[in-house]
Image: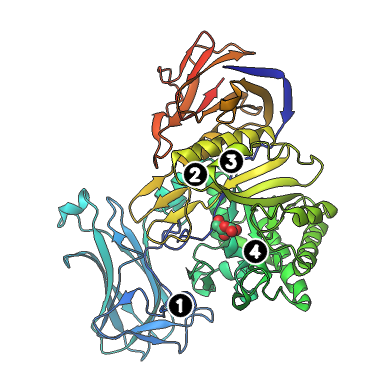
Amino acid sequence: ATIDIDFTKTKKISNKLIGVFFEDINYAADGGLYAELLKNRDFEYTDKDHVGWNASTGWKSDQPIVISTEKPLSKNNQHYAIINKSSLINSGWDNIISSKGNDFDFSMFARCIDGRKNQLIISLVDSLGNSIAEGKIKIEGNEWIKYNLNLKLDTKKHQEYLNKLHDLALIITGKNQGQIAVDMISLFPHQTFKGHGMRIDLAQTIANLKPKFVRFPGGCMLHGDGIDNIYNWKETIGPLQDRKPERNIWNYHQSRGLGYYEYFQFCEDIGAEPLPVMAAGVPCQNSSANTKGIGGQQCGIPMDKMPEYIQDVLDMIEWANGDPATSKWAKMRQEAGHPSPFNLKMIGIGNEDLISTVFEERYLMICKAVKAKYPNIEVVGTVGPFHNPSSDYVEGWKFANQNKKYIDAVDEHYYESTGWFLHNTDYYDSYDKNAPKVYLGEYASHTRTMESALAEAIYLCNVERNADVVEMTSYAPLLCNDKHKNWNPDLIYFDETNIVTTPSYETQALFSNFSGDKYISSKINIEEKYAYRVASSVVRDETKGKTYLKLVNALPTKVCLKVNGMNLSSNTKYVMFGGSPESKTTERISNDTNNTSSALVIGNNIIQLPAYSVVGIEL
Ligand code: AHR
């Protein structure tokens, strides 16, 4: 077989093709990226979050737990617990894990209900009952005060904590005559990603993908399953105790500790552009929770409330980009610790909504208002529910095309079989280059195996060929806490201690690290029956002055490609991964960019691709 590379045939392509889709699904936020170690720190869990949950879920005690709402910490945080001679115990999401060499930051709000001075003992206790970190807090006065305590593991006395991880529980013990109200009880590892409250290992795994953008906070999570459940960004900023917790459409609780500020900060910390997506004035499929599903009674934000909702959208842009000297929203950003603008360039409106009149009216009102006030902000709309054979986004595209003055790009979603991805590599070939751009915002093939990674890599080679039409892509979903799964497959699985990346993660990493802004024509010539299982893409990054060749071989045999159109150097740098199709992990054949080993034989201008492999070569 041969590959013809033609450097005279080039075109400009998007330089932000690979991003990530962060949805608070599978405990991706609380119990995931957000490093808070305690479950239900605010005592705000309810039966609406999850059947059977209540304000004391996640907490244990040697006596019945007393919950009160009198004189609460905040109007958005009504419930708190009362301790006197009792204790309160929290074992975290699944377990609190001792961390080698790291200590913990404890904080809580408390007040003495009867005005007496009181004391609480805060300890981290292992499964044998040994207290391995301890501190005391004196509580004074009848007003809510925040108390902080650094808890350092006593590794002198308990040397086993130096080299082995242990399960811990936090215990707050009171031995008081008086009653103490406690709320917002929080435990963080002392070290978090760039000091901004995210779990280091997970944040780094996402950062390693070098995503060009991060879409957040969903998915269906953002438009909710009723008007009352639409994600309201204003409820997620400011002091933690004043944020409004909310039910998560995926059947759990949002503490909102990971709110808009933290999302934007995380984007900045990993060098990705923020892509906040806001509801188009309608909940999921235009239905409320009790009229669920297509065909149910359609609902949207009442028209007389739409100006207020649109103002919320505009305020968000002001909050992200405005000048604190003139904008009250930007001042809030400054007060939270970020005086300089976040430099927001794009906003998503809508998420795979049913294309109905209720939707269209509201969607257009929002898009028009954003463009009128912020003509330079890119508006990313939607073309409807996720792709299936009976829905090809016809109505959504028609509407976007009619209104392309206000809609710069649209979000397409599809979850398909590996076969679908292998046989639809021409999907974007016929797309109109003058229509709004495509954001392939959610896609994945059905398995979490190497077979999927190969199919997605072949598909991405062809998306890159059409990256003058497709501006952005993001595999979905990104994160899954293995003990709290709502959706499968996902890109990264984790629990309290481990992170397992999937073969599809390697595909994303490779396409992100070997991306460019100029497409260079390449064509593989191979027997027709094999052609759909072998693919190539050549791009150049003009800023870095580097050219990359990506090759995918999804055949069970090696493929030798004679390269026409350029001379390969003998010390070509490359990365390669592969593995048997059913494998859930990748065999990293090479991750050394200076690798010149024989895994990928390059000689006489011939590249030998192993069976089932994906390769990125720096030319
Ligand atoms: O990615 C999981 C879900 O799939 C998203 O929430 C939704 O947008 C889609 O249906």
* Residue 168 visible at all: yes
| Left or right of residue 34, residue 211 in this image | right
**Quadrant of residue 325 in the image?**
bottom right
Residue identifier under label 3: 421
Crowd class of label 1 (few under 14; some 14 to 19; many from 20; radius 10 Å): many
- Residue 336: x and y in percent read 56, 62
Image mark count = 4
Q: Residue reaching furthest top?
A: 604
Marker disc for residue 44: 1
Instruction: Name the residue type under label 4.
Output: Lys
Which label lies toward us, 1 or 3? 3
Looking at marks 4 and 2 on the same chain, the residue that comes earlier in the sequence is marked by: 2
Looking at marks 2 and 3 on the same chain, the residue that comes earlier in the sequence is marked by: 2
Q: Residue at position x 52%, y 8% from top?
A: 604
The relative height of residue 616 versus residue 598 in the rendered view (above or below) is below
- Position of the N terminus, as image quadrant, is top right
Spatial CA span between label 1 and label 2: 32 Å
Instruction: Name the residue type under label 2.
Output: Ala
Marker disc for residue 400: none
Looking at marks 1 and 2 on the same chain, the residue that comes earlier in the sequence is marked by: 1
Q: Secondary structure at mark 2?
A: helix
- Residue 155: x and y in percent read 19, 55
The relative height of residue 335 versus residue 66 in the rendered view (above or below) is above
Residue identifier under label 2: 207
